[in-house]
Structures are given as structure tokens and as C-alpha cells.
Amino acid sequence: MNMINIDKQHLTQYVSDAETKQMLEEIRDAKTTLVSGRGKGNDFLGWVNLPEEQDVSIVNSIKADVACLAPKISVFVVIGIGGSYLGARAVIEALQSEYMHAVEPRRPFVVYAGHTLSEDYYHQLLQLLDREDYAVAVISKSGTTTEPAVAFRIVKSHLESKYGKAEAANRIIAVTDARKGALHDIAVKEKYPMYVIPDNVGGRFSVLTPVGLLPIAMAGYDIDALLQGARDMRRICLENDSFDDNPAMEYAALRNILYRKGKKVEMLVNFLPNLKYVSEWWKQLYGESEGKEGKGILPHSLSFTTDLHSMGQYVQQGERLMFETFISVDKPSSKVDIPVDEQNLDGINYLVGKSLNEINHNAELGTMIAHRNGGVPVLKIQIPQIDEYVLGQLIYFFEFACGVSGYTLDVNPFDQPGVEAYKKNMFILLGKPGYEGQQLV
Ligand code: PA5
């Protein structure tokens, strides 16, 4: 059953039904290009059938590793950058309590490394690892990315001095290429358990491989339900060819119509702080897939009501260059009432009897109307609740829409040549062997 509803009621003054209908053939063509594997970057389409073709033995092996490691650790360090950590972090932080470490102490607490080169960050991480029992997943498709390589060297050294080399090897799991890369070679030499990232799945599309599944399972979440959600959304995306029945096609169409009307920035908006990393994952997915050849919608994100008090002014009255995509969640997973106060000195007794969710939804509706009336097209992606199954649907929905949207834009949505420029400059500046005498780009 489709858990994703595209609500266009705040879009009608910007995009007419006729304009949407006119887009149908183009979007169908883009979908056919994607599904038939005839488009640009077609050697990276493994994600399309991944939920259906997922090897059960890999999922079972992940569960076995979790059963073995989780009881003896309090912290699980996930080392990776970009697509090698954002998907896992998006799912874990969407599901876990904000105060997880204090509230649910039985689960391993997942911390992240390899996504920054901040010295202070690693100093603080090592202070934590000094006092916690921990294990590590080191994740890199290429196995050569500098940031996770640096982090792994630091954490591995700490792990080996804390537990000894033999026990350290029992606490490290590598996720990388099947055949090549420095990480692959280290894992083979040190006999670390290893999961493979399929050749035909790019980093930002890899959350449903062990890249995402291992950390998510280690954090205590149901990867079967996540995969089932993705499987069901895959069927919806592949089997339906109309906007009414295929939310990914409709989303791809609407964002391209808005882009062609000069709306060059898309703000992904949520009203729940635990969706922050869903937005970060989405930004990489769309930014790396579409931002090339001088084209592409700039993906940006906002968390309301928090950011209404910082960015709200700009959205309401600044340059009219953006549209907003709200992720709206019907039901919260918990309930908090507003207590009665006889004195009513704060003047909010009128809220008593309403749930916080009702108040938040009214803030959401009020914001949509204000922004729409202020010149910002507003699109709503409505989901019933946040759980593993719905997140699985949401992940596949965004991935499929991204592939269709990228082909509609006529770019290769599955490469990221621009990411190399900063790396080359960094290597020249740091004197990496082989880069001597080269010009900065
Ligand atoms: O989408 C991508 O492929 C990239 O952004 C990668 O996720 C990121 O650069 C990390 O690469 P790797 O997994 O090879 O370390």
C-alpha cells in the first residue's frame, strides 16, 4: 500500500493541471529510460531492483553480526562520508529518541566519524571511546576516500591499544568494494569481516545495501520492515504510469515544472527535528545527481518551527527563487499534553486540551498558507508516521524520483565528477605522492 501522498493544494496558483498533464509524456519517457537501462550512467542502476533482489544471506549475516556484537558494546562507530553514512544516519536519527543515550541505554549508541577532518571532533570522539565498549564499521565504496581513511587509522589505533590486535579485529567490520581499494586490501590482510557494496550501486543510492543496513540493524531497528517498505514502493514506481498512482513520477514532474519557471531552489521542510538527516541524505541525493553541466535545482533544507525564527523572514519576503517541499507526518509516535495552569500568566491556556501534534500541525498549515501567499510554491509529501516501513518507502520514492528527474533534466544522475576538484587541490597542498608540481584547479 502506498504510504506517500503528494498534496498539491498549495501549488494550484503556481502549477495548473494542464501544465502537469503536459509533462506526463516527458516523465514517462524519462522513467522508461531509467527502467530500461538505456540512459546515461546506466552502469549504476543496481539500486532500482535492489530491494527485490537483496540477497537474504547478506541480511541474515548482518543480523548475526548484530546478535554477536551488540550485547558487548555501548557504542558503535560508523566511519564513512557522503553516501557511505548519510542514509544510515537519516534512518537511525529519524527513529531514535533525541535523548537516546540516556533513555534507551540497552541499544548500542551509533556515533559517526570519517565525515569530517576536525581535530577537535576526533579528540572528543577518542575521549568517548576511552570510556565506552565499542566496535566499528568502516564504510567506503572506493576504499580510498581520505576522510574515512584518516578516521579509520585513528580509531583502529585506539581500538588495538584498548583491546589488543586480535580482539580489535573482532570488533571491526569493513563495507567496501569486492575486489579493489585500500580498505578492501586492509580488510583482507587483517581478516576483518567484510560486506560488499555492489559495483552497480553508487554511494548516494546505497542505503539499502550493507552500507545502511549494518548500522541501522546495529542501532536496533528492523531492516526487514525497511526493505519491505522499499520493495512495495518499488512495485508502485515500476508498475504505474500515471501521476495519480505513481508519487515519484508526480514529484519529478512538479519539481521540473517549477524549475523551468525559475524556481531554482528547493527547500525540503520538516516540522520534526528527527528528520534533519533525512534532509541531509536527500540533499546529497539530489545535489550530486542533478547539479552538473551548469544545471540543477539547488537542494536546501529547513527544520520548522525552529528555522521560522531564523530563515522564515527570507522565505516569506526575500527573493522569489525557491519552492518548498514539506514532509508532513500525520501521527507522532508519542503524546505530550499541555498542562493546565490556573493563573494563565503565559496566556496559553487556550491550547489546553490540544495535543502538541495538533499545535505543530496548525503551525505547519499556517506556514504553508503564509509562504504560498508570499510567493513560494508549496508541495506537500504526506506520510502517516515514521517507522522503518514508511522510511523504506520514502527512501525508494526519493531515489526513483531522482533518477526520473535527472533524466528529465538531461544529465547523468549517477556520476559526480565535480567532487574530485577539491580532492585534487587538497592532495597538491598536502604534498601527496604523485601530485608534486601540479596546478591547483
Ligand atoms: O555519492 C557518492 O558516490 C559519493 O558522494 C560518495 O558517497 C562519497 O564520496 C564517499 O565515497 P566512498 O564511499 O568511496 O568513500
Image (tube, grey):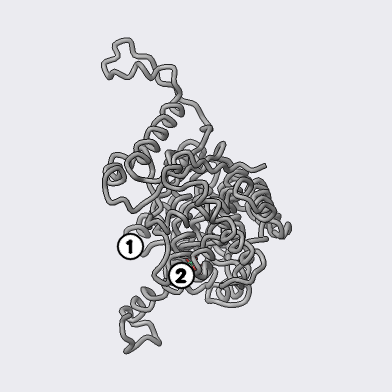
- The residue shown at (59%, 43%) is 390
Q: Residue at label 2? A: 149
- The residue shown at (52%, 70%) is 412
Q: Find the residue positioned furthest to the bottom.
A: 437
Image x and y of residue 220, in percent: 59, 45
> In front: 158, or 153?
153
Image x and y of residue 362, in percent: 41, 29
Q: What is the C-alpha distance between the residues marked 1 and 2?
A: 14 Å
Instruction: Pick the quarter of the image with the N terminus.
Output: top right
378 displayed left or right of 43: left
Q: Residue at label 1? A: 119
Query: Type of residue at label 2?
Result: Ala
183 displayed left or right of 258: right
Instruction: Pick the quarter of the image with the C terminus.
Output: bottom left
Q: Residues within 10 Å of mark 1 (few under 14, many from 20)?
A: few
Q: Secondary structure at mark 1?
A: helix
Q: Are marks 1 and 2 in contact (CB under 8 Å)?
A: no
